[in-house]
């Protein structure tokens, strides 16, 4: 009986004493010590005290109470060394709950939202110049589609002007009356004719006279008179270099303007008619030459306007027309009133020329020559022509 009590007292002392240090007892997995692990857990320090299962502590308390009731005396508690005291119990780590949606940051992206970090493409703003009346649709080819041209008259500068809107062709030699009648089956209703000028290539016009102008007018044709006067001193075409402007550009321009008005009157073109000065392409980068050319053009335009005719201007878009736009921006006076610009192998566009401000020379003051040296056949007659889109004044035939 005494041996049994002694064994129970020993066992209770161990349980009350607290955790067993692994450093003091290294016989892991010894029989009878089920509360110790049989193998050292991975990552545990062997010198760290192991906590006692709380269920064993509760069991040891019940056993001590049973022992007191059996023996009637208490066993003195053994002193507990500092290193054997039970370590404070650690609460197991728990993942904190996710905050409510109301407390989430406002900038937290939602999974179903699309990405917004990519910049939005900039959309170009549509631009439409004032007075751009032609339709925006372009023909499938550079051949003008058949349409009904619009013609009208407007008063400006004290003289009436006849405005033509439609398609026109021009060629060095004016066609015969019969050819003009055959070409009524074409989409054209305007024709450019070279009626004068010392640099005109086809000087002998076997069909162009007062009778021809009247008959074509009765058919419904609109005439664009072209005057090929003196050329720029830095003209590019070799064939035109013998017709360059002389030493007094202003006086020469005034003289040739009077010649142009005189020839137009003899052909039956009344005041208010547009006369177009033909200035072939020249080297705009040569400043002295450019100043001489500009003086001639201004003098010619001023004199034509004083004679109650409309001064027009034909040239390459990259040289003469670009030059006139620079002069306009610089505030030069006595410039031509109508721009007839040549830019080939592009769709016909009156307000799409890059060297002309879209707000300048409008309304009814532009002609685009968009193709040259092409051959067409209408009504059984074949002609080599240049193609033009017109919204400008034409000749008034009496």
Image (cartoon, grey):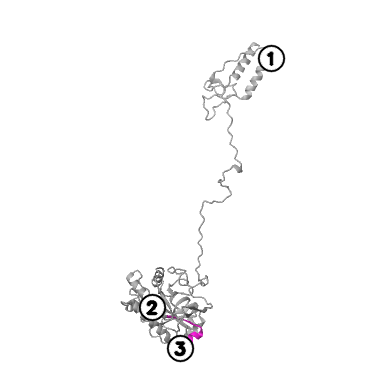
Q: Main secondary structure of the magenta part?
A: helix
The mark nearer the N terminus, 2 or 1, is: 1
User: Residue placed farthest to the right in the image?
Assistant: 69
Q: Position of residue 264 (x, y in %)?
A: 42, 84
State the quadrant of the N terminus.
top right
How crowded pointer 1 is (Cα within 10 Å; few <14, some 14-19, many 20+) is rated as: few
The mark nearer the N terminus, 3 or 2, is: 3
Q: Position of residue 179 (x, y in %)?
A: 47, 85
Q: Position of residue 205 (x, y in %)?
A: 40, 85
Q: What residue sits right under mark 2 in the picture?
A: 300
Q: Are marks 3 and 1 in contact (CB under 8 Å)?
A: no
The mark nearer the N terminus, 3 or 1, is: 1
Q: Quadrant of residue 383?
A: bottom left
Q: What residue sits right under mark 1 in the picture?
A: 69
Tag 3 secondary structure: helix
3D distance between C-alphas at marks 3 and 2: 28 Å
Tag 2 secondary structure: helix
Q: What label sits on residue 211 in the rendered view?
A: 3
3D distance between C-alphas at marks 2 and 1: 140 Å
The span picked out in magenta is 211-225
3D distance between C-alphas at marks 3 and 1: 152 Å
280 versus 39 height, above or below:
below
32 versus 277 height, above or below:
above
């Amino acid at each position: 009986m005494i041996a049994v009590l002694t064994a129970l007292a020993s066992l209770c002392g161990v349980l009350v004493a607290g955790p067993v240090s692994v450093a003091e007892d290294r016989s892991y997995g010894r029989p009878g010590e089920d509360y110790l692990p049989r193998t050292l857990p991975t990552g545990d320090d062997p010198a760290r005290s192991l906590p006692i299962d709380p269920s064993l502590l509760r069991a040891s308390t019940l056993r001590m109470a049973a022992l007191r009731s059996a023996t009637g005396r208490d066993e003195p508690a053994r002193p507990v060394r500092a290193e054997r005291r039970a370590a404070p119990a650690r609460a197991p780590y728990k993942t904190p709950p996710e905050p409510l949606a109301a407390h989430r940051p406002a900038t937290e992206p939602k999974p179903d939202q699309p990405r917004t970090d990519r910049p939005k493409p900039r959309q170009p703003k549509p631009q439409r110049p004032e007075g751009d009346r032609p339709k925006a649709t372009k023909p499938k080819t550079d051949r003008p589609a058949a349409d009904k041209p619009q013609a009208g008259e407007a008063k400006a500068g004290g003289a009436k002007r006849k405005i033509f809107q439609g398609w026109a062709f021009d060629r060095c030699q004016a066609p015969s009356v019969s050819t003009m009648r055959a070409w009524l089956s074409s989409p054209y209703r305007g024709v450019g004719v070279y009626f004068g000028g010392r640099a005109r290539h086809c000087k002998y016009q076997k069909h162009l006279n007062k009778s021809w102008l009247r008959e074509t007018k009765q058919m419904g044709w609109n005439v664009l008179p072209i005057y090929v006067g003196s050329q720029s001193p830095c003209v590019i075409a070799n064939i035109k270099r013998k017709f360059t402007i002389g030493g007094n550009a202003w006086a020469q321009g005034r003289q040739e303007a009077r010649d142009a008005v005189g020839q137009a009157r003899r052909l039956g073109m009344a005041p208010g008619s547009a006369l177009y000065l033909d200035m072939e392409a020249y080297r705009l980068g040569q400043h002295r030459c450019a100043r001489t050319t500009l003086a001639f053009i201004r003098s010619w335009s001023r004199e034509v306007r004083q004679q109650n005719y409309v001064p027009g201007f034909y040239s390459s878009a990259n040289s003469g027309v670009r030059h006139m736009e620079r002069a306009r921006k610089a505030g030069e006076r006595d410039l031509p009133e109508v721009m007839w610009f040549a830019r080939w192998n592009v769709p016909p566009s009156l307000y799409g020329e890059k060297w002309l401000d879209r707000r300048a020379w409008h309304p009814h003051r532009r002609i685009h020559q968009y193709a040259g040296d092409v051959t067409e056949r209408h009504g059984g007659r074949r002609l080599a022509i240049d193609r033009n889109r017109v919204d400008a004044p034409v000749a008034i035939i009496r």
